[in-house]
Image (cartoon, rainbow, N blue to C red):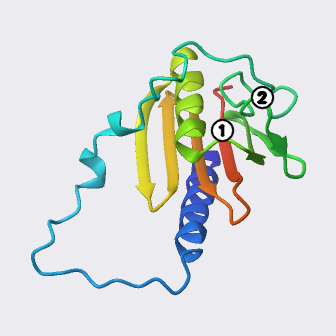
C-alpha cells in the first residue's frame, strides 16, 4: 500500500512539474526520433558530476527515524513537516525541501546516498530542467524529484519506504 502511495505521489509531482511549464507548447515533427522506451532508459545520465564526491556527504536526516538514504541535501531547508507513516511493510515518509544546488547535483547526491545504503537505481527521468530518480532493494525504496523554482532555488520532494 505504501508503494502505491509513494508511486502516486511521485507521479503527481512529475505531473505538477510538467504543468509548471505553462504556455509552452510544441508539436512533434515527423522527422523527430521517437523518445527512448522509459523502461529501457539508461540511468547513467544521472551519474554524479565530476565535482561530486563518490562517498556520501554528511547530511541531515529528513526526519527522526528516517533511514540514512532519506537525507536533506547539505544546507537545505525543509518546507514544512515531513509526512510520516508506518504500516505492516515498515515505515515511510514524504518530505519537501529547498536548496541552492541545481537539480542535477541534488539527484547525484541522493543517488550516492541510496547506493551507499545498498539500494539499486531503478528509475531516472529528465523533463525540461526537472529531474527524478528512484532506487530500491526488496521492500525499501527512495524516490526523488528535483525542479528549479522561479527564484533560482531547487525544490525537492523525497519519499521513501523502509523494510520493516
Residue found at the far left of this picture:
31
Local SS, label 1: strand
Q: Is residue 91 left or right of residue 114?
A: right
Residue found at the far top of this picture:
55
The quarter of the rendered structure image containing the C terminus is top right
Q: Is residue 95 visible?
A: no
Distance (Cα) linking label 2 and label 1: 8 Å
Q: Residue at x 55, y 53 (%)?
A: 7
The correct choice, above or below, for 136 with respect to 3 in the image is above
Q: Residue at x 29, y 85 (%)?
A: 27
Rendered image: mark on residue 160: 1
The correct choice, above or below, for 117 with respect to 49 in the image is above
Local SS, label 2: loop
Rendered image: mark on residue 66: 2
Q: Residue at x 46, y 28 (%)?
A: 48
Rendered image: mark on residue 43: none
Q: Is residue 49 left or right of residue 153?
A: left
Quadrant in which residue 86 is drawn: top right
Amino acid at each position: 500500500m505504501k508503494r502505491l502511495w509513494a508511486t502516486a505521489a511521485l507521479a503527481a509531482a512529475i505531473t505538477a512539474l510538467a504543468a509548471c511549464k505553462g504556455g509552452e507548447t510544441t508539436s512533434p515533427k515527423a522527422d523527430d526520433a521517437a523518445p527512448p522506451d522509459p523502461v529501457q532508459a539508461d540511468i547513467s545520465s544521472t551519474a554524479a558530476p565530476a565535482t561530486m564526491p563518490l562517498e556520501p556527504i554528511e547530511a541531515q536526516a529528513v526526519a527522526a527515524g528516517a533511514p540514512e538514504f532519506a537525507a536533506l541535501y547539505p544546507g537545505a531547508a525543509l518546507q514544512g513537516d515531513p509526512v510520516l507513516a508506518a504500516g505492516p511493510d515498515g515505515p515511510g515518509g514524504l518530505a519537501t525541501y529547498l536548496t541552492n544546488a541545481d537539480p542535477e547535483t541534488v539527484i547525484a547526491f541522493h543517488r550516492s546516498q541510496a547506493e551507499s545504503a545498498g539500494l539499486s537505481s531503478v528509475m531516472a527521468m529528465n523533463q525540461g530542467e526537472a529531474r527524478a530518480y528512484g532506487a530500491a532493494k526488496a521492500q525499501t525504496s527512495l524516490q526523488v524529484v528535483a525542479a528549479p523554482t522561479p527564484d533560482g532555488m531547487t525544490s525537492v520532494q523525497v519519499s521513501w519506504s523502509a523494510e520493516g
